[in-house]
Image (cartoon, grey):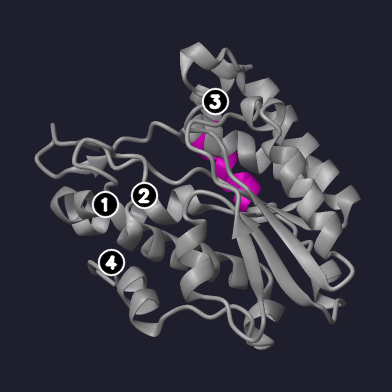
Amino acid sequence: MDVIWKATGVALLSILSYVQAYPSSAFASSHKTPFFCFGGWGDGLLNTTLFKGASGRNFGHNGATTVSFRSGGYWDEVLTTVRQVRDDYHPLVTIQFGHNDQKPAANISLSQYTRNLERFVTEASNAGATPILVTPLSRRNYDKSTGTPRIVMSLANETLATIIAAHRSNAAYIDLNKTSTWYLNAIGPENAFTYNLNPADYTHLNVPGSILFGGIVAELITQKLGTLEKSGYLRVNDKLKKNVDYGIYYWP
């Protein structure tokens, strides 16, 4: 299975992206204020894009896999929070993994990774939330061998697996990997590295990086769940949105 994905991933990813459904009717029919459960870039999104009483919590945990996030009790915290707020809010849970699942030490196959994501979707839905699968944020590693630095596509299999999980579980998804890769290619390594948590960390984000990619996530979500933007709950900084659209370096 894993070998086949590596050979056919680009074509299959294009097909899946084209035929994806938009399962947003559940939120569209809700009149409750949204409550977001995020991870990773969550602080940037929570602090800069939510309005009109929309709120949430960042459940991000460095080093987590789809297995350890559950076994460590962090997923139970997410579900407990969903149950606590669902009477007063409409909970939305973003689910993004991949960076740590792909490491050999994790011993998680792509098929297991996909099943784990599907299970997260089912349990979030059963708890009363709208789950949104998120393809993994691109690492900021560049291949400079051709003269023009280009992002190393190290998460292509995990991206495809996330989209497959979304289709199998009928969940909404956003392709953060595609958008972040395009943007990082556009601005180049010198600018991209300013978002590193530390100079040698090309995965985790500092505060400006969290604001940038949190804004990108918010924009991608509004493209799938337009009611959030129309209701005024989720709004992206105009300059951030314009710079990302045109591939211009953004510093908040």
Which numbered marker is on residue 101?
Answer: 3
Badge 1 amino acid: Asn
Q: Can residue 24 be seen in this view?
A: no
Is the C-beta separation of discs 4 and 2 under 8 Å? no
Q: Quadrant of residue 86?
A: bottom right
Residue at (60%, 49%) from the top-left corner? Answer: 59
The residue lying at 39 percent from left, 44 percent from top is: 138
Residue 197 inside the magenta-drawn segment: no
Residue holding disc 2: 181
Could you tell me residue 131's position as x and y percent? Answer: 74, 54
Report how far apart the C-alphas of labels 4 and 3 lie in the structure.
Answer: 30 Å
Q: Nearer the viewer, residue 115 or 94?
A: 94
Marks 4 and 2, Cα distance to the nearest angstrom?
11 Å
Crowding near pointer 2: few (<14 within 10 Å), some, many (20+)? some
- Residue under circle 1? 185
Q: Is residue 240 above or below residue 186?
A: below
Mark 4 lies on residue: 247
Point out the stretch of residues depicted in magenta: 9-17
Marks 3/1: CA–CA distance: 24 Å
Which of pointers 4 and 2 lies earlier in the amino acid sequence? Answer: 2
- Disc 3 residue crowd, few under 14, some 14–19, many 20+, Cα 10 Å: many
Q: Position of residue 109 (x, y in %)?
A: 61, 17
Please say if the residues under marks 2 and 1 sit with CB atoms less than 8 Å apart.
Answer: yes
Amino acid carrying label 2: it is: Thr
